[in-house]
Amino acid sequence: MDAALARAWVQAIAAAIDEHTDQLTQLDSAIGDADHGANMRRGFSACLDALADTPLETPGDVLVRTGATLISSVGGAAGPLYGSAFRAIGRALAGPDAGAEQVLSALTEGLTAVKRLGAAVPGDKTIVDAYTPAVAAFEQELWEGGGLAAAAAHAAEAAEAGARATTTMQARKGRASYLGPRSVGHQDPGATSTALIFRALAEVTVR
């Protein structure tokens, strides 16, 4: 991963969020404030503007700038959570380019940041339920000899499965937790947007 690929990833995320804004809004309307789609679209649109304004030479620069922009432009819990994740990923990618193992380490740092800030674990019906299996699948693919593209593809599949699995969970964190058992039967919007982020990574690594 170099700066160009990192930029392409953010651009692909923005496009995916824009395409799925209504879906994210509908999911959030069932168990949240119905603003996740609009917030994420606004945040990643702001990221595109921020990246266009400044020449950034490393993938870390691109992703740290993305994280900082999300924190400042996305409302609710999503801004701090996703912003912290991207800043942690970026800080772990300090060089001009990064191999697949470095990307894995960076993604792991992002997950750690999310878990630390949100105090969530798998099963809480959050971002973590998509992010955790994505990192595990990425790592497993590398162990089996795959490269970045294959690892990203498997991570995307795992994130999507993780997001779907939140449907049967009862929320234990965030606004959805106020619903108690009524949160069961609804897919978590944060896990869904996380799956979109990993799918975007898979798409850009095969171009």
Image (cartoon, grey):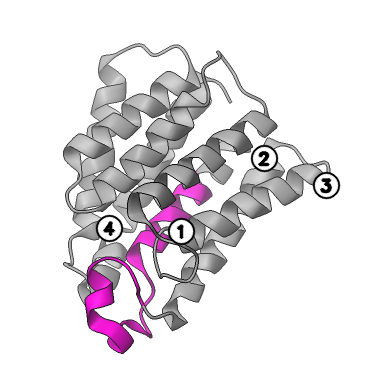
Dot 2 falls on a residue whose secondary structure is helix
Percent coordinates x, y for residue 181 in the rendering: 32, 88
Residue topped by disc 1: 128
| Cβ–Cβ under 8 Å for marks 2 and 3 | no
Residue topped by disc 2: 149
Residue topped by disc 4: 21
Residue topped by disc 3: 144
Q: CA distance from mark 2 to mark 4?
A: 26 Å
163 vs 53, left or right, is: right
Percent coordinates x, y for residue 101 in the rendering: 68, 33
- The residue under label 4 is which amino acid type? Thr
Q: CA distance from mark 1 to mark 2?
A: 22 Å
Dot 1 falls on a residue whose secondary structure is helix
Dot 3 falls on a residue whose secondary structure is loop
Question: Which of marks 3 and 2 precedes in the sequence?
Answer: 3
Write the start and end of the magenta stretch as one range. 171-200
Residue 63 lies in magenta, yes or no? no
Tell me what residue is drawn at x 18 percent, y 60 percent: 35
Question: Which of marks 4 and 2 precedes in the sequence?
Answer: 4
- The image quadrant where one finds the C terminus is top right
- The residue under label 2 is which amino acid type? Ala
- The image quadrant where one finds the N terminus is top right
| Foreground of the two, 48 or 84 | 84
Is residue 45 among the parts visible in the rendering?
no
Question: Which of marks 4 and 1 precedes in the sequence?
Answer: 4
Question: Which of marks 4 and 3 precedes in the sequence?
Answer: 4
